[in-house]
Amino acid sequence: MSQTALGDAVGVTFQQIQKYESGRNRIGSSRLYELAKVLDVPVSHFFLKMEANPTGKGRSRRERGRPTFSEPRIDREMMGLIRAYYKIKSTSVRGSIRRLLEALAKL
């Protein structure tokens, strides 16, 4: 899905979508919910690779910053895989697929 199409679906410009993706602008909870609906993913998807301490509490001011993610940006191929994965109703089948992918990634 293009940034323009995503922006149109949630009522913002593609420039605003770019700012969300880059982390320049924060996303409110209601907007995050809208994005999850449009992308057909659970809201929790956006937090899967986030560091454990995003608020920076317990770190010096210098160490504080925006939450970081260990994975590259999500592209169309990955979004297609995620949508297909969550359409599988059986949690045991999804678990088997996840374990298979993890095993293949080690090769």
Image (cartoon, rainbow, N blue to C red):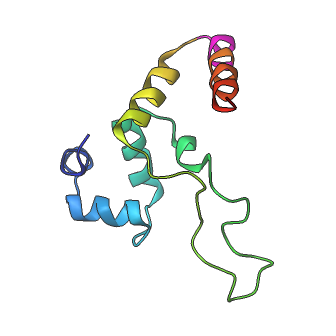
Quarter of the image with the C terminus is top right
Give whichever of 57, 105 is nearer the camera: 105
Q: Position of residue 5 (x, y in %)?
A: 19, 44
Residue ID at (63%, 55%): 50
55 relative to 82, above or below? below
Where, by quadrant of the figure, is residue 79 drawn?
A: top left
In the displayed structure, would residue 38 be above or below residue 24?
above
**Magenta-colored segment: predominant secondary structure:** helix
Name the residue at 66% across, 19% down.
100
Number of on-image labels: 0
User: Which residue is at 64% across, 25% downward?
Assistant: 104
Asked if residue 7 lies left or right of residue 53, the reply is left
- Vertical placement of residue 40 versus 86, above or below: below
Q: Quadrant of residue 14?
A: bottom left
Residue 103 vs residue 69, the one in the foreground: 103
Judged from this view, the residue extending furthest toward the front is: 107
Magenta residues span: 90-95
Please state the horizontal and vertical placement of residue 71, each as a whole percent of the image. 56, 51
Find out whether residue 22 is within the magenta segment: no
Q: Residue at x 69, y 88 (%)?
A: 61
